[in-house]
Image (cartoon, rainbow, N blue to C red):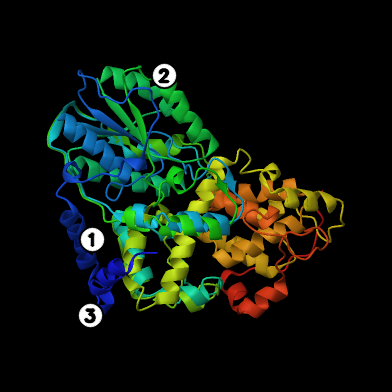
């Protein structure tokens, strides 16, 4: 955790010390001022090079360089993005234009050469490094060098229409994409939910937690608009980056490629493929803009417990949990323009289940994120400690749609550690340690999404109980439609279907019951991952895989009392939920019904 000196500084800047809460505009202006006070641009900021991995054999930008490109994949934001900032630093240093390319945007990397097997093991390692890595960002500035070509105009409507999605899944309505929406949600969490996080975060009736395709594209459209306002052309290229980007780099005389970090199988494969296809004199560098402490810095092996990683992170927070400099208006003009983006077409052509409805509770974009953040700070942070585990209470941050803003959220939440000490402690545990433990797990385990990734004790106990009689067996279709005999489980699934998210406490119960109601652990994990990736706004992310593995195969956990089906894997019962929160209130809220049991064929 932060040093005593840093705590004193945080206390002096605490928003709660003021007599009136700031407006959203004041809140966002204060954050921008902090960036500008940190540095006037990234060029004058002492960038921590440990955030960067050199992927290519070469490090120097070639003399013919006429631009730098940031391949934006996981971290789809402009400000508070270390990868974007590093790309601008390269462009400013070489006095060339800066470009952004987006391709397949999907939901990090490292923390150890060996997977940490429990959240406790990972927690200590992350916390020991937080002073070093949980640092403020400098701003991304308007780039002073103009490209000699313009980005291709983007038809955003066409981009959305062209994206293959399941349109039966409704839109997410409780969150909007974009920076402002993320900041709004962050502010709301800090002001309203953080205070109850410690006691209410596991109650799905309480809103104490930090809270697709069209949703994502609308957010990306806002990113493109912000980039263009900063004289940074935004390009939406068709096809996977390894197949498209190398020739584009040659055609546009790009001298360096910067990418962000996602420790999942496919994006890591793309980075390696891109490395092999780029010209040998083009440097390819990767920046962990997702984790506060870079994954490869936290640990050189897989961490098995939250205790281990917490210590490692806490020891580095002072170095890495820093304010950002601004991304500035880029001073160098490109000699070519970006093509116009047909966003409707992009959505229509994107592969997705179009039966999944849109998310309506959240809007994409930075402004929406800031609005949600502000509401959390103002309203829910104070009850987070007490109400976070009660799913009937509004005590969560609701920031999950903007999960990539975590370092900004952490910087804001820490300002309240003297007002809501327990809420801040517990929120940082969940938002930092558990989240970065998930990246560690996926980076160091080749089997992050199958039973082979479970610990030896868990694999053995699940095998020992493989043939145990299941009282209920459900198909994936029955589970997807919330058609089980358990109205509480059905209500949790309906929350996922309606909102694109599920309360954290209910997610544990939800996953455990899938193990209990399916023919095998392999089927249970397959179903849980499918449902999470298919319906959750933050699916296809390390946190989702780690959560499913925890529920079903005991990853980051330890053995418990042995019982049928579960063996020594932790069990959560309906009666346990009744003791934790008002089950009837949660069921009434989401409308889960008891269905007559029909065994899956």
**Location of the N terminus (image quadrant):** bottom left
Question: Quick check: 531 above or below 58?
Answer: below
Q: Position of residue 159 (x, y in %)?
A: 38, 37
Q: How far apart are marks 2 and 1 (CA)?
A: 40 Å
Tag shown at residue 349: none
Of circles 2 and 3, the one toward us is: 2
Tag shown at residue 31: 1
Q: Where is residue 560 in the image (x, y as percent from the top left)?
A: 74, 64
Which is nearer the N-term, disc 2 or disc 1?
1
Please rate how many residues cluster around mark 1, counting C-alpha atoms within 10 Å: few if below 14, some from 14 to 19, many from 20.
Answer: many
Q: Where is residue 61 in the image (x, y as percent from the top left)?
A: 25, 24
- Judge by depth and name the residue closer to the eye, 173 or 54: 54
Question: Quick check: 418 above or below 499?
Answer: below
Residue 76 as seen in the image, left or right of residue 511: left
Q: Which residue is drawn at 58% across and 45% down?
A: 115
Q: Residue at x 63, y 43 (%)?
A: 449
What residue sits right under mark 2 in the picture?
Answer: 277
Label 2 residue SS: helix
Q: How far apart are marks 2 and 3 (CA)?
A: 56 Å
Label 1 residue SS: helix
Which is nearer the N-term, disc 2 or disc 3?
3
Query: Mark 2–mark 3 contact, CB under 8 Å?
Result: no
- Judge by depth and name the residue closer to the eye, 14 or 252: 14
Which is nearer the N-term, disc 1 or disc 3?
3
What residue sits right under mark 3 in the picture?
Answer: 20
Residue 364 visible in rendering: no
Residue 51 visible in rendering: yes
Q: Position of residue 261 (x, y in %)?
A: 42, 40
Of circles 1 and 3, the one toward us is: 1
Q: Residue at x 35, y 77 (%)?
A: 418
Residue 119 as seen in the image, left or right of residue 145: right
């Amino acid at each position: 955790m932060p040093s005593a000196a840093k705590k004193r500084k945080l206390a002096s800047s605490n928003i709660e010390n003021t007599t009136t809460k700031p407006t959203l505009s004041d809140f966002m202006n204060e954050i921008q001022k902090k960036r500008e006070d940190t540095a006037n641009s990234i060029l004058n900021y002492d960038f921590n090079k440990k955030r960067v991995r050199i992927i290519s054999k070469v490090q120097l930008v070639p003399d013919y360089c006429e631009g730098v490109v940031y391949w934006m994949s996981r971290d789809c934001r402009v400000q508070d993005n270390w990868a974007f900032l590093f790309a601008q630093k390269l462009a400013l240093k070489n006095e060339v234009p800066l470009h952004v390319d987006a391709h397949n945007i999907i939901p990090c990397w490292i923390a150890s050469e060996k997977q940490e097997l429990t959240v406790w093991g990972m927690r200590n390692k992350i916390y020991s490094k937080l002073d070093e890595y949980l640092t403020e960002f400098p701003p991304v500035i308007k780039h002073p060098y103009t490209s000699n070509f313009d980005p291709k105009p983007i038809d955003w409507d066409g981009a959305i229409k062209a994206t293959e999605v399941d349109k039966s899944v409704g839109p997410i309505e409780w969150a909007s994409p974009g920076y402002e929406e993320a900041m709004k949600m962050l502010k709301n969490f800090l002001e309203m939910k953080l205070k109850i996080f410690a006691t209410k975060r596991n109650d799905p009736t309480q809103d104490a937690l930090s809270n697709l395709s069209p949703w994502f594209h609308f957010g990306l459209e806002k990113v493109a608009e912000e980039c263009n306002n900063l004289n940074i052309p935004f390009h939406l290229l068709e096809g996977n980056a390894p197949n498209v980007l190398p020739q584009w780099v040659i055609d546009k005389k790009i001298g360096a490629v910067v990418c962000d970090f996602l420790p999942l199988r496919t994006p890591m494969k793309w980075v390696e493929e891109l490395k092999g296809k780029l010209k040998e004199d083009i440097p390819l560098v990767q920046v962990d803009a997702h984790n506060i402490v870079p994954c490869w810095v936290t640990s050189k092996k897989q961490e098995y417990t939250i205790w281990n990683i917490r210590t490692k992170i806490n020891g580095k927070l002072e170095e890495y949990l820093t304010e950002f400099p601004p991304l500035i208006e880029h001073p160098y003009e490109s000699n070519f323009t970006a093509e116009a983006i047909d966003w409707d077409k992009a959505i229509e052509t994107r592969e997705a289940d179009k039966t999944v409805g849109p998310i309506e509770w959240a809007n994409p974009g930075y402004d929406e994120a800031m609005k949600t953040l502000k509401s959390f700070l103002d309203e829910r942070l104070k009850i987070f400690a007490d109400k976070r585990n009660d799913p009937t209470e509004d005590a969560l941050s609701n920031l999950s749609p903007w999960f990539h803003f975590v370092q900004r959220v952490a910087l804001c939440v820490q300002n309240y550690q003297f007002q809501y000490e327990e809420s801040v402690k517990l929120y940082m545990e969940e938002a930092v340690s558990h989240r970065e433990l998930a990246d560690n797990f996926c980076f160091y385990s080749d089997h992050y999404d199958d039973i082979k990734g479970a610990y030896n004790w868990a694999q053995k106990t699940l095998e020992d109980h493989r043939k145990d009689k299941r009282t209920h067996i459900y198909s994936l279709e029955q589970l997807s439609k919330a058609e089980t005999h358990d109205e509480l489980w059905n209500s949790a699934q309906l929350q996922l279907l309606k909102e694109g998210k599920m309360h954290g406490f209910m997610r544990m119960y939800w996953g455990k019951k899938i193990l209990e109601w399916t023919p095998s652990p392999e089927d249970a994990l397959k179903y849980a991952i499918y449902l999470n990736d298919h319906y959750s706004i933050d699916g296809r992310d390390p946190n989702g895989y780690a959560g499913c593995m925890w529920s079903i195969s005991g990853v980051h956990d330890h053995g418990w009392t042995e019982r049928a089906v579960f063996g020594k894997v932790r069990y959560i019962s309906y009666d346990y939920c009744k003791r934790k929160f008002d089950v009837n209130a949660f069921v009434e809220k989401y409308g889960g019904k008891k269905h007559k049991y029909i065994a899956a064929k």
